[in-house]
Image (tube, rainbow, N blue to C red):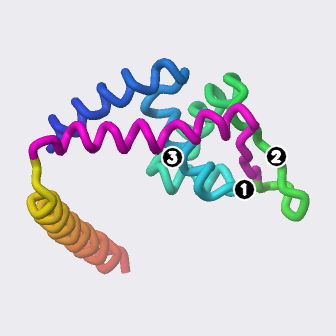
Amino acid sequence: MRHIVRLMGLEIDRKMEPHGLTNAQWIPLIKLYERPGGSVAELARSCQLDNGAMTRLLDRVESKGLCRRVRSLSDRRVVNLELTPEGEEAARTIPEVLCNMQNTMLAGFSEAEWLQLVEFLQRILKNAERIQAEVEAAAAKGKS
């Protein structure tokens, strides 16, 4: 699975290059496009990055003119994010690239095979989430 994800990431990077986006950069862009107005902390959680990594990534995305940080008027400690018009334009290209990539990777699969694959992957994810929850519960129990 890791090998598939790595190869897909390389191909997505290649397809995003004409748009000036790397794999690390398009993910927060599409998340901001789908859920505008979130905070840096919310985006970091959504992208599964720590706040420091998200700040460095946003520095690069902001330097490209694709997003901007806006301090919250109600809570000065909170920094919200918004896409610039250029960022919105770039984000609109992402779903098509991803759809084409998915179609290419699933070439030769019937619809039934694709649905079965989705079911298998969902079961693997559910098992992995259950294991993680058990580990976290055991760790929390050990601390109390």
Q: Residues within 10 Å of mark 3 (few under 14, many from 20)?
A: few
* Mark pair 2, 3: CA separation: 20 Å
- Which residue type does callout 1 highlight? Gly
State the image coordinates of residue 38 (x, y, percent, origin top left): 68, 57
In the picture shown, does residue 107 fall above or below 121?
above
Q: Residues within 10 Å of mark 2 (few under 14, many from 20)?
A: some
Q: Nearer the viewer, mark 2 or mark 1?
A: 1
| SS class, disc 1 | loop
Q: Specify which label sits upstream in the sequence, 2 or 3.
A: 3
Q: Residues at badges 2 and 1 in contact (C-beta under 8 Å)?
A: no
- For numbered disc 2, what is the local secondary structure? strand
User: Between residues 57 and 34, which one lies in front from this camera angle?
Assistant: 34
The residue positioned 51% from the left and 46% from the top of the image is 50
Residue of label 2: 70
> Nearer the viewer's eye, disc 1 or disc 3?
1
Name the residue that disc number 1 marks: 37
Identify the amino acid type marked 3.
Asp
Q: CA distance from mark 2 to mark 1?
A: 9 Å
Say which residue appears at 19% left-offset and 62% top-offset: 118
Q: Position of residue 3 (x, y in %)?
A: 15, 35
State whether residue 143 is above or below residue 76: below
Given contact means CB atoms under 8 Å apart, are the residues at marks 1 and 3 in contact?
Answer: no
Number of labels in the image equals 3
Any magenta on residue 40?
no
Q: Which residues are magenta?
A: 79-108
State which tag comes first along the sequence, 1 or 3. Answer: 1
- Viewport quadrant of the N terminus: top left
Q: Position of residue 73 (x, y in %)?
A: 90, 58
Spot occupied by residue 131 in the image (x, y as percentages of width and height): 19, 69
Q: Main secondary structure of the magenta part?
A: helix
